[in-house]
Image: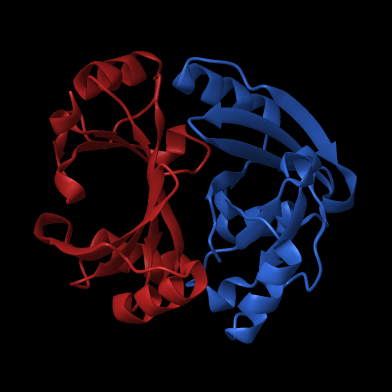
Chain colours: A blue, B red
Amino acid sequence: MQASKIEHIGIAVKDLDKSISLYEEMLGYECYKVEEVKDQKVRTAFFKIGETKLELLEATDPSSPIARFIEKRGEGMHHLAFAVSNIEERLMNMEKKGINLIDKKARKGADDLNIAFLHPGSTSGVLIELCENKNKK
Amino acid sequence: MQASKIEHIGIAVKDLDKSISLYEEMLGYECYKVEEVKDQKVRTAFFKIGETKLELLEATDPSSPIARFIEKRGEGMHHLAFAVSNIEERLMNMEKKGINLIDKKARKGADDLNIAFLHPGSTSGVLIELCENKNKK
């Protein structure tokens, strides 16, 4: 897949404002952006850490994937995102290698990235997101 | 806490050799080390990715924390490790801020690091590890 870095780590939280305060207190600096992603029914908050980011995710609706995750497993790490180039080519390669895709085509995600998810059943239980920043080409 | 980067992301797996093959296939390169950490009753495999690492963890005994995690929640992301300096001072600071510590003092972990865990009940459900590389001072 030739991922250049971990783009971010997604963390499912019940109460975004409370978790922002907690991570601000723990890391010693402020989150740099809060954003709503309507089609995923989430509100997100981002913290920079080295070359990567933490993305806190709160459901804005009970039908959100984040609400369903928390219901099943409680708060915690939800997904792991790799920065890649040529995301469509990567998805084709993953599929050829027998990895099940949640998204057969990339779509718009938070932070203005093109994203696609791989199925955790194919990746030792980890929900993996591929992210491409088209602006960085 | 002034963490400089994500040191690694720990992933609990049932079958280390199978997951090594899977991540090698997915990432397109080989894991650089397999190591047993006897006091944690785990066998670990490391992959470099940008400035951070993925650490696959397999239990070597049913009483291992990794075996108990998998029994409860299945395979998946287990912990998130931050690189810090002055780990003992960081632990004192965390405790002062009301964050519960699993390890009140740092101890030896995999990859020759000094490590300590924070309690996930204090950190939105994420098991956080602080890591100090004493050789890098």
* Residue B115: quarter of image: top left
Q: Quadrant of residue A16?
A: top right
Q: Is residue B19 above or below residue B72?
A: below
Q: Residue at x 64, y 53 (%)?
A: A70
The residue depicted at 68 percent of the width and 53 percent of the height is A131
Residue B6 in view here:
yes
Left or right side of A121 for B29: left
Horizontal arrangement in the rendering, residue A12 relative to residue B8 (left or right): right
**Along the line of sight, the residue nearer the viewer: A37 or B49:** B49
Whole-percent x, y for residue B119 in the image? 36, 37
Q: Position of residue A21 (x, y in %)?
A: 59, 20
* Count of residue discs: 0
Residue placed furthest toward the right: A38
Q: Does residue A88 appear to the left or right of B45 in the view shown? A: right
Residue located 69% across and 64% down the image: A117
Residue at image location 63% in from the left, 41% down from the top: A13
Is residue B81 or residue A12 the one in the foreground? Answer: B81
Which sits in the foreground, B69 or A4? A4
Does residue A100 appear anywhere in the picture?
no
Q: Is residue A129 above or below residue A105?
A: above
Residue B99 horizontal/vertical position (percent): 39, 25
Quadrant of image for the C terminus of chain B: top left
Task: Classify the position of the N terminus of chain B by image quarter.
Answer: top left
Q: Is residue B102 above or below residue A18?
A: below
Residue B94: where, in percent of width, then height?
A: 35, 20
